[in-house]
Amino acid sequence: MASFTKHRTLSGEVNMQRSITAALIGFFLFIITAAAVSAQVDVPRRTTAVTYPLGELVMVQFRGTTRFPRMKGEARVKRTSRNGTEIELTVSKMPRPFELGAGYATYVLWAVSPDGQVDNLGEIKRRGFFEFDSKISVTTPLQTFALIITAEPHFMVTRPSQAIMLENLNPYTTDGKAIATVPAVQYFGNSSDYFRDARTPEIAEVDYAKTPSTILQAKQAVALARYAGADRDAQNELSEAESLSKNAEDSWRAGRSEESVDIAARQAISTAVKAESTAAVRKDAREKRNEKTRNDAEIREAENKTVVAQNQIDSLQQELAAETRRRELAERDAVNYSNQIKDLRDENGRLRDELARTKADADAVRSRLSTLEGENQNIKAERDRQDRLARIQSAEPGLIAALRQVGTVAKNERGVVVTLPESFWAGPRVTSFAPNADTRLTTLAQVINNNPDYSVVIESHTDNSGTPDQLQTLTNDRAQAIASRISSLGVVSTRIQAAGMGASLPISPNTTAANRAKNRRVQIILTPSLN
């Protein structure tokens, strides 16, 4: 569990008729989804962390992962000086957890910090039989973090499972202010084979919808403890957890109050988690004892080998004495072999020279091969560049036609230029958008996303009415406002450059009101990226 205080307010309900047809649809959806989850591969995941400014209300949208793309979520996040970061999360269209496979019984909200630390913020309790909506309100001392929602076997897990259901997107504020993000936060979830093991038990033998969530969680907590080896290393704790789980289930079947059943089930979950951790500790201690036993055996074996080695040394010393006597006899034959040795040395020298020449030839061949490979890579790179240029040129008419929905379109040596008129803004000297600007901004973001081979330069201009500093600040803020808005609509921020030009580049003399209106403009230049 996270080390900080959490205040949870959970609510959710779904009103649906439980007809036979709907039950059959849910059953087949469960079978298909369980098969997809069981085949999932554990891999590191990346998400986006947000730095929440003090006192600023930030809106964060959530998207469902590929497993359940229909899921949605929205959070209202505000960092305060007294309570830390307050999070109010609303989720909708959440499926029943057991649709993901036999291993899941509830949902948990997690905070992921930029260093990869994951904290359990709280459980999202399910309500209803099919998809349901719910809310959760929590507080965390963190300032920079990502939010994810996972399906879990029970609410006391300390690592997120690989069943990621929702991830946060880039944040936004009501006034369009840019919020700092960390776009590549990496973390690892629970990599236990339990979630892919064919032996994973069913979490209930009766109708899932009629079984309370905490009863299902208690069953899974006990199963996880047994899977971790508690039936060997924490038998008493496991037995107590099983007894508490059975008591909770018996209370539910006997019609006891929901609160008493919930308390009993959560006590069973806590005891099962304790059994699981105790089993892990005792297993580690047993393995250490086994390791010491193996080390002692290896020491005894080494001592035996030392005795054998000493015997071998004595034998070798005897052989050395005999060899010395043989050498004295062989020295008489040394003179006869001296000429043969000279011939062998000469031959050895000749072979060394030949080997050196062979190595030099091989080095020359390798150098030529490396040169040819480099030339081939250059040719391939140039061919790829030409192909990209041809692709850009063939798609350019369609790009220009699409951009005409946003503003006036022209083409020059810098690329395709879209000019946004002064009517794009709420007034001549403000940085807020006109009411009809959102539609064109959405169209602009879609066109840019559909043409990834272009980089985007946003240049804001104005007339000369005002001081240079005022004009520079105005155009800087306008350019940055457009950049922030299209970035929040999905355009990768690394493709965007925003700059305010002040009144330095007028297209007409600032002598009349009409000319000054022409000079108050924003130009968006789409330049082909050929590298």
Image (tube, grey):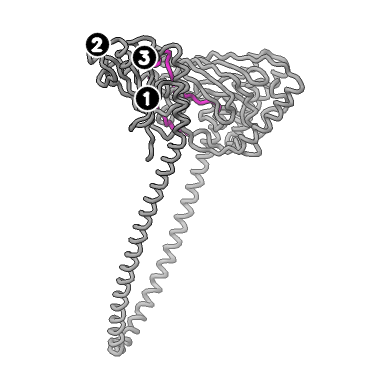
Relative to 299, is 30 above or below? above
Residue on which disc 1 sits: 524
Relative to 460, is 350 above or below? below
Region in magenta: 165-187
Of residues 174 and 410, the one drawn nearer to the viewer in this rendering: 410
Mark 3 → mark 2, Cα distance in angstroms: 17 Å
* Badge 1 or badge 2: first in the primary sequence: 2
Residue name at image x 40 percent, y 74 percent: 315
Mark 3 → mark 1, Cα distance in angstroms: 14 Å
Relative to 252, is 194 above or below? below
* Badge 3 or badge 1: first in the primary sequence: 3
What's the amino acid at mark 1? Ile
What's the amino acid at mark 2? Gly
Mark 1 → mark 2, Cα distance in angstroms: 24 Å
- Secondary structure at numbered mark 1: strand
Relative to 40, is 146 above or below? above
Residue name at image x 33 percent, y 33 percent: 413
The numbered dot on residue 102 is none
Of residues 416 and 83, the one drawn nearer to the viewer in this rendering: 416
For residue 282, side relative to residue 231 (left or right): left
The numbered dot on residue 422 is 3
For residue 405: magenta? no
**Residue 316 in view (yes/no):** yes
